[in-house]
């Protein structure tokens, strides 16, 4: 699919989609629960559907729940999932193959969950997933008693448990390795202890999200020695007791800050205003820092509660200002922050985010490549690639194509949903008469179904 975007002003008020990270964690933990969970208002997307399918393979029964609202075809609106889980010791495997599709979170978290079982499970996925290594996680699972085979840490991956506890060293270039073990290890047999040393940890807020779920299960109390899951305050060490069981997980899934950044950026870059509903500024999601970055760049950001629910209003009446932004905790922001930097005065440095290279694409490389295409006429634009980020000289970055009319700039989304949506936002800020054509635009559906309708 090729999306054609012409510059126009975005003024909108909307409810953001549910969080993909929250939805996947809820699905997997519900699948490991010996009970029935009602997951309300989750994100329905290819990634979460892949996770739901994985949970079925691991023994869960999942059915769709519909609201009393009626769509135009007379059927109720899909509003949630009912998940009948099974304690891993009681699970009956319905299949041996899990296709994670494009979802790295599903792949890594489900690998550790599958290692709780005594049957072997094989994982596969799409071409992008084929380049994402689970090597450190597989090494840890083997040291905990599982058997594993892979293609140099990549799919196809086969694991067979059950894991039986022990001590492992787990460098986490992606936090998903640690989250995977934190979810699985409490369900190991009674009287087992799992100890994890973490010499490297990126994306710390996503570990905090996982720990929040363990806290809701009564298993984790911030570094308390008597907790079932205890850890250092810097998350460099965890000690996890086995023999636990999860209780059902119910309620609505929180809104997604990772998706909300795109309508916010679209409004700012187009000279408009957006009101975003469904976000909670107290959520653990790392990408909420984007709204602090907007303030630093000179935008107006106003949070308020309406009828007990939060909403945030975003606009920009002045000139965007560059700055230095450490994206270690929020690597998914790199494409959209690079776009913001291209339209900002002065220099923008995006740093400490080498792990952005191992996402759906090498986001550092492809973002630089596409920004250079977007502003090819402008010799003042400098988008310098660094091992751990980007340096962008963005002052008057659109001046080079100002005055041109009826031109089309062809860009490649590289099949990466966050790159695609960032480039679409950039297109809105270009001079009138410009058209931007983005190939692979369907990738936006991975995390933001309906994104293109909002952009219209």
Image (tube, helix red, strand yellow):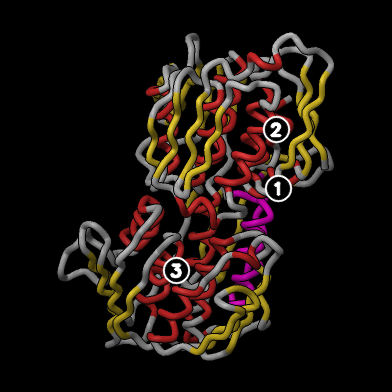
Q: Depth-wise, is mark 2 or mark 3 nearer the camera? A: 2
Q: Quadrant of residue 235?
A: bottom left
451 versus 174 height, above or below: above
Image quadrant containing the C terminus:
top right
| Residue 96 sits in quarter | bottom right
Disc number placed over residue 373 in the picture, else none: 2
Magenta includes 52? yes
- Where residue 396 appears, as percent x and y from the top left, is 56, 15
Asked if the residue at tag 2 contacts the one at tag 1, i.e. Cβ–Cβ closer than 8 Å, the answer is no
Q: Which is more N-terminal, label 2 or label 1?
A: 2
CA separation in Å, label 1 and label 2: 14 Å
Between 26 and 358, the one nearer to me in the picture: 358
Against 341, is 223 above or below?
below
Q: Position of residue 423 (x, y in %)?
A: 66, 33
Name the mark nearer the viewer: 1 or 3. Answer: 1
What range is drawn magenta here?
43-67
Q: Is residue 421 left or right of residue 233?
A: right
* Residue 414 numbered tag: 1
User: Spatial distance from mark 1 to mark 3, Cα to Cα?
Assistant: 28 Å
Q: Is residue 241 magenta?
A: no
Q: Residue at x 38, y 32 (%)?
A: 324
Q: Residue furthest left?
A: 225
Q: CA distance from mark 2 to mark 3?
A: 38 Å
Query: First in sequence: mark 2 or mark 3?
Result: 3
Dot 2 falls on a residue whose secondary structure is helix
Q: State which tag comes first along the sequence, 1 or 3.
A: 3
Name which residue lies at 79% across and 23% down.
435
Outermost residue on the front side: it is 379
Which class describes the residues within 10 Å of circle 3: few (<14), some (14-19), or many (20+)? many
Which residue is the site of mark 3? Answer: 180
The quadrant of the image that shows the N terminus is top right
């Amino acid at each position: 699919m090729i999306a054609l975007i012409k510059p126009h002003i975005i003024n909108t008020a909307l409810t953001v989609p549910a969080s993909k990270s929250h939805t996947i964690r809820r699905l997997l933990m519900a699948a490991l629960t010996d009970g029935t969970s009602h997951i309300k208002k989750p994100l329905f997307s290819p990634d979460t559907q892949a996770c739901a399918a994985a949970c079925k393979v691991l023994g869960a029964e999942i059915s769709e729940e519909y609201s009393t609202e009626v769509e135009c075809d007379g059927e109720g609106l899909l509003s949630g999932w009912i998940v009948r889980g099974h304690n891993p010791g009681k699970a009956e495997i319905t299949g041996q193959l899990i296709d994670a599709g494009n979802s790295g979170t599903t792949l890594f978290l489900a690998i550790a969950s599958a290692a709780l079982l005594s049957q072997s499970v094989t994982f596969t996925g799409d071409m992008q997933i084929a380049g994402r290594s689970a090597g450190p996680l597989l090494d840890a699972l083997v040291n905990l008693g599982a058997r594993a085979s892979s293609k140099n840490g990549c799919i196809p991956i086969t694991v067979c448990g059950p894991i039986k506890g022990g001590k492992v060293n787990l460098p986490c270039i992606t936090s998903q390795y640690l989250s995977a073990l934190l979810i699985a290890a409490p369900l190991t047999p009674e009287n087992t202890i799992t100890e994890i040393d973490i010499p490297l940890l990126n994306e710390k807020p996503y570990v905090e999200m996982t720990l929040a779920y363990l806290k809701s299960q009564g298993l984790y109390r911030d570094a308390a020695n008597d907790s079932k899951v205890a850890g250092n305050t810097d998350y460099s060490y965890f000690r996890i007791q086995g023999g636990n069981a999860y209780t059902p997980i119910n309620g609505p899934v929180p809104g997604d800050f990772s998706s909300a950044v795109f309508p916010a950026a679209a409004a700012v870059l187009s000279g408009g205003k957006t009101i975003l509903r469904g976000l909670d500024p107290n959520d653990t999601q790392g990408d909420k820092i984007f709204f602090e970055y907007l303030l630093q760049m000179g935008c107006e950001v106003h949070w308020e509660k309406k009828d007990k629910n939060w909403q945030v209003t975003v606009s920009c009446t002045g000139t965007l200002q560059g700055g230095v932004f450490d994206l270690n905790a929020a690597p998914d922001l790199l494409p959209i922050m690079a776009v913001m930097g291209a339209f900002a005065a002065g220099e923008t440095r995006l740093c400490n985010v080498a792990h952005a290279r191992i996402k759906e694409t090498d986001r550092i490389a492809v973002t630089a490549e596409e920004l250079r295409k977007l502003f090819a006429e402008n010799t003042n634009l400098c988008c310098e690639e660094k091992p751990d980020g980007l340096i962008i000289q963005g002052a008057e970055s659109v001046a080079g194509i100002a005055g041109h009319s009826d031109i089309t700039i062809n860009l490649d989304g590289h099949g990466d949903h966050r790159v695609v949506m960032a480039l679409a936002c950039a297109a809105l800020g270009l001079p009138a008469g410009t058209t931007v054509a983005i190939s692979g635009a369907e990738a936006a559906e991975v995390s933001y179904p309906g994104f293109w309708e909002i952009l219209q």
